[in-house]
Amino acid sequence: MSTNIKHSQNVLKFDAKENNMTQKMNYNNQQKSNNKLKVGGLFAGIGGIELGFKKAGFKILWANEIDKNAAITYKMNHKHKLFEKDLKDLQTEEVEKIDILTGGFPCQAFSLAGYRKGFNDDRGNVFFEILRFVDDLEPKVLFLENVKNLKGHDNGKTFEIVINELESRAYHLNYKVLNSSQYANVPQNRERIYIVGFKDKKVYDNFKFPKSKKLTKTINDLLDDEADEKFYYHKSKYYAQLKEEMLNNDTIYQWRRTYVRENKSKLCPTLTANMGTGGHNVPLIIDKKDIRKLTPRECARFQGYDDSFILSNTLAPSHLYKQIGNSVTVPVIEAIAKEIKKALNV
């Protein structure tokens, strides 16, 4: 009997120790989860920046987006709070405090493809709404994305204003133009400027933009063999000319009003928001069946979204094209976010 009692005591002792270890592990995991730096996103679109930061291990608390169709896609793919309103109407008291503020603020005002009006355009003036959130939330880190031309717009005056406004708020800034084809292993020629700001000078000194990586994926790796009938051009008035000039099935073409342009770089041309304003703005390919435009799913792949990302079948393709063209290349964001994480030592 005493042996059984002793045995039972040993079991009880072992279970208690195991339970303590389990509790400690759970506590450490909980602490690790609680220690995740929190992110808030402005001009979220379909959430490419948020997705990149999430993949890098950050916790997304909230985001803001005004476009109702983009919001539909956003909510299908993200669980955190989305404020669906004009940023000018979003009060900083409505949102939770965050460590990192992100924003891919509207680029059309600075884009070579747009009117290039800069701060004279309402879409350019929203930069000053970002500053309102910076002033009130005082995040540790800022992450902003825009078109490459932001740096040279108005002979550099626009970019000077952006940098001066952020530096006057005691942020130490690093910025660089990165091409998706060189930093994401995604065969799209997409150059964007990324601005990263840190309150802490030591963290700033620790930060480096990611190194370039070898492009191993090809255009054909991201294409489907065939697509739905609606994407084909055999009923188009341009079909005869397209048929005559589109000869290669390992490249991507564009219809430029009166002529066909072949992208001989073996890269997808920069996907733009105006893909949603007319079929001829969507890049063209030759598949096993015939000449067609890229599908929204294929465009999403060229932005680094995997096929688990939901594209609503209730939205017209024009809306999906616009959303994807307005988005970011997710693996580029993830790579930068990982470098931010290293710099913060978290």
Image (cartoon, helix red, strand yellow):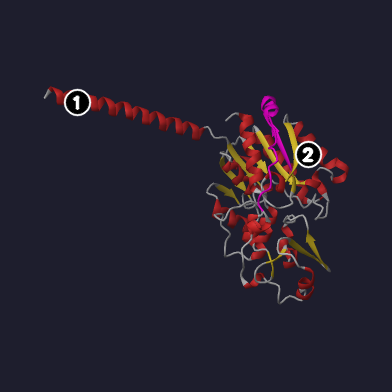
- From the viewer's perspective, is residue 297 above or below residue 205? below
Mark 2–mark 1 Cα distance, whole angstroms, equals 72 Å
The picture places residue 89, in percent across and down from the top left corner, at 66, 48
Residue 156 position by quadrant:
top right
Seen as rendered, the residue at the extreme left is 1
Closer to the N terminus: mark 2 or mark 1? 1
The picture places residue 142, in percent across and down from the top left corner, at 68, 37
Which of 112 and 94 lies nearest the eye of the viewer? 112
Labels 2 & 1 near each other (Cβ < 8 A): no
Residue 5 visible in the snapshot: yes
Neighbourhood count class around disc 2 (C-alpha, 10 Å): few under 14, some 14–19, many 20 upward? some
Residue located beneath label 1 in the image? 7
Which of 337 and 249 lies nearest the eye of the viewer? 249
* In the image, residue 198 lies in the stretch drawn in magenta: yes
Neighbourhood count class around disc 1 (C-alpha, 10 Å): few under 14, some 14–19, many 20 upward? few
The image quadrant where one finds the C terminus is top right
Q: Residue at x 68, y 31 (%)?
A: 207
Which of 86 and 55 lies nearest the eye of the viewer? 55
Element type where label 1 sits in the image = helix
Three-letter amino acid code at the position of disc 1: His
Span shown in magenta: 193-217
Image check: 165 left or right of 223?
Answer: right
Q: Residue at x 13, y 22 (%)?
A: 2
* In the image, residue 269 lies in the stretch drawn in magenta: no
Element type where label 2 sits in the image = helix
The picture places residue 219, in percent across and down from the top left corner, at 68, 57
Residue 138 visible in the snapshot: no
Q: Which mark is residue 162?
A: 2
Number of the front mark, 2 or 1: 1
The image quadrant where one finds the N terminus is top left
The picture places residue 285, in percent across and down from the top left corner, at 71, 65
* Total number of numbered discs in the rendering: 2
